[in-house]
Image: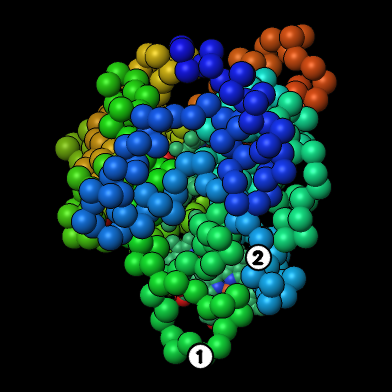
């Protein structure tokens, strides 16, 4: 509380000085964000104390807030200096194409922007730690939102005006101080390279790189004593974690920049296997998480409805035998767990049910999935839409878009068809 009270004063004193340095090597956040001494101190001491080079690299690479890149080296051409993903894409075409279609390029969509309308800048900056981490992105968003602490000067040429809205851009993961960092190269590299070459950092091939944003720390927010973001810990406890098979092996195979997950039918299909066993007119269907390196699904947002549908061979008409929801269901206030039916890696969920009267031995049971990748957001956004009269037109427009986009991610398909009798 004390800290909060002190901020406006400190902020005012610093603003005039900091304004000149918005785009240069002085963090704008020093003036505009509530400093979080406990977190920062922990990270720094961790970096110093750690003898693990990957942990030390990551503590510095992802320090929060990130300082601005500063002035690019004078000999850089415009395209080498530019932080625009499109500029990187002129040479790294494959990564650019895949990234553009990935969710990492959509982390600053309507879903977060409507919330920024209702949030003070310092809270929004905390969100951008994961959604748009570069200092230059935070500065542009501050201008777009007309926040009181926005820079007054136009951005320099290497900062494209839409960078703030482009989400988790290439430079957020790869560029610090205009220097490129990347994984161990897989091919011979020329002696002279654009952008002064790059620094090899093994951390890029390590799951801890992803944990920065996909895992809350031990003292992070919880519901029913479970961390709300716990993917890395789930992975560590799994056979994949124990075997050292990193997140990248499944989410960036062949180093592809696609990061497909629960929004993708192929990935959901890869995650699950099903087995039908029979006991007279009773059947058991096991849904087994054989392909996700963490819980299926990993956290509270998605819900997957599993339907068992009995039908005669070749017939479209079916009888619904059972319907079961897989997911971690939490109320809108995130205070109460309603149920948790997620399936840990390697484990199964069994649905047992009687066959319908008059079933035939040549009948078939389909395992049919209805996937809602953003179910929790659908519910949350709807509850705010119910109070639409309290929102201004811009916020309401963004919220309506966000809700429509969330619903549009739903998909359904037949995961497996099991004949009742093995032919
Ligand atoms: C003028 C062409 C050009 C531009 C523009 C460019 N790069 Fe590169 N970059 C290269 C070349 C050539 C290499 C050498 C390795 C290769 O061929 O992939 C390289 C290497 C890299 C590596 C190291 C890859 C590894 O094996 O570890 C990273 C990371 C990288 N660039 C990121 C970026 C990012 C991010 C941007 C935009 C901010 C960018 N580059 C802009 C040409 C370019
Ligand atoms: C979420 C962070 C993230 C973003 C965003 C990102 N990358 Fe990467 N990139 C990685 C990681 C992690 C690896 C290494 C993967 C591995 O080792 O399996 C990598 C590898 C690379 C490589 C080396 C590829 C190879 O085949 O050896 C290049 C080049 C590269 N990235 C360029 C880009 C460009 C260009 C963009 C934007 C279009 C981009 N990256 C966006 C995290 C990211
Ligand atoms: C520790 C990193 C982190 C922080 C901090 C964070 N997010 Fe996220 N956010 C994520 C991840 C990871 C996902 C989604 C992963 C997925 O979809 O599977 C996500 C997804 C979302 C989505 C749904 C996708 C979309 O773009 O519509 C919204 C909305 C969102 N976050 C808003 C916020 C807001 C608002 C804040 C600040 C109050 C915030 N986030 C802070 C990591 C973070
Ligand atoms: C700087 C923060 C950050 C880092 C680092 C990061 N991510 Fe993400 N990731 C996000 C956010 C935010 C989203 C949410 C995108 C959305 O839905 O709008 C996301 C989405 C995803 C998704 C899509 C999930 C879905 O719902 O379909 C996958 C998969 C993913 N990330 C995997 C990875 C992997 C693997 C790494 C490490 C190589 C990584 N991420 C590194 C922030 C990050
Ligand atoms: C063995 C392969 C595998 C490994 C290893 C793996 N994943 Fe996944 N991941 C999947 C599959 C398959 C899905 C799609 C099904 C699902 O959502 O669980 C997925 C989904 C996701 C999602 C989408 C959201 C959700 O609720 O499921 C995110 C985010 C994600 N993974 C991040 C990570 C991170 C971070 C790591 C490393 C700590 C990791 N994954 C390790 C296979 C893997």
As measured in the structure, the alpha-carbon distance from the residue carrying label 2 to the one carrying label 1 is 21 Å
Report x, y in % for residue 219: 30, 27
* Mark before the other along the chain sequence, 2 or 1: 2
Q: Residue 269 or 229: which is nearer the viewer?
A: 229
* Residue 51 image-quadrant placement: bottom left
The residue indicated by pointer 1 is: 191
Q: Quadrant of the C terminus?
A: bottom left
Which residue is painted at 39% across and 37% down in the image? Answer: 40
The residue sitting at 32% across, 37% down in the picture is: 42
Quadrant in which residue 356 is drawn:
top left
What label sits on residue 202 in the rendered view? none
Horizontally, residue 320 falls left or right of residue 149, namely left
Residue 76 image position (x, y, % from top left): 68, 74
Closer to the eye: label 2 or 1: 2
Residue at (60% x, 32% y) in the render: 31
Q: Is residue 253 above or below residue 317?
A: below
**Numbered-mark total:** 2
Relative to 125, is 248 on the left or the right?
A: left
Q: Secondary structure at mark 2?
A: loop
> What residue sits right under mark 2 in the picture?
72
């Amino acid at each position: 509380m004390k800290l909060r009270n002190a901020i406006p004063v400190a902020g005012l004193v610093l603003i005039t000085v900091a304004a000149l340095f918005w785009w240069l090597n002085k963090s704008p956040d020093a003036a505009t964000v509530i400093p979080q001494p406990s977190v920062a101190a922990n990270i720094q001491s961790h970096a110093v104390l750690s003898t693990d080079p990957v942990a030390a690299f990551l503590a510095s690479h992802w320090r929060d807030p990130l300082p601005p890149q500063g002035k690019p080296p004078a000999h850089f051409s415009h395209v080498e200096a530019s932080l625009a993903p499109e500029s990187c894409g002129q040479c790294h075409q494959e990564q650019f194409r895949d990234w553009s279609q990935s969710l990492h390029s959509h982390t600053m969509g309507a879903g977060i922007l409507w919330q920024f309308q209702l949030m003070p800048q310092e809270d929004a900056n905390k969100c951008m730690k994961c959604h748009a981490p570069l200092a230059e992105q935070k500065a542009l968003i501050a201008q777009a939102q007309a926040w009181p602490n926005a820079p007054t000067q136009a951005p320099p040429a290497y900062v494209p005006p839409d960078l703030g809205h482009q989400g988790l851009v290439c430079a957020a993961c790869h560029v610090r101080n205009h220097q490129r960092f990347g994984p161990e190269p897989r091919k011979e590299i020329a002696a002279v390279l654009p952008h002064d070459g790059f620094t090899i950092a093994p951390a890029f091939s390590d799951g801890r790189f992803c944990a920065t944003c996909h895992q809350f720390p031990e003292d992070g927010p919880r519901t029913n004593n479970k961390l709300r973001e716990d993917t890395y810990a789930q992975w560590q406890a799994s056979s994949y974690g124990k075997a050292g098979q990193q997140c990248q092996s499944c989410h960036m195979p062949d180093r592809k920049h696609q990061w497909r997950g629960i929004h993708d039918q192929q990935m959901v299909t890869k995650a699950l296997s099903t087995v039908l066993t029979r006991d007279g007119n009773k059947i058991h269907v096991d849904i087994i998480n054989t392909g996700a390196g963490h819980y299926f699904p990993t956290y509270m947002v998605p819900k997957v409805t599993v339907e068992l549908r009995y039908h005669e061979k070749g017939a479209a008409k079916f009888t619904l035998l059972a319907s079961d929801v897989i997911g971690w269901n939490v109320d809108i206030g995130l205070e109460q767990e309603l149920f948790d039916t997620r399936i840990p890696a390697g484990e199964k969920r069994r649905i047992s049910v009687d066959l319908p009267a008059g079933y035939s031995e040549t009948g078939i049971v389909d395992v049919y999935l209805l996937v809602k990748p953003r179910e929790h957001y659908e519910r949350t956004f709807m509850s705010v839409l119910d109070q639409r009269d309290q929102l201004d037109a811009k916020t309401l427009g963004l919220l309506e878009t966000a809700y429509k986009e969330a619903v549009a991610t739903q998909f359904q398909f037949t995961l497996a068809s099991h004949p009742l009798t093995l032919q």
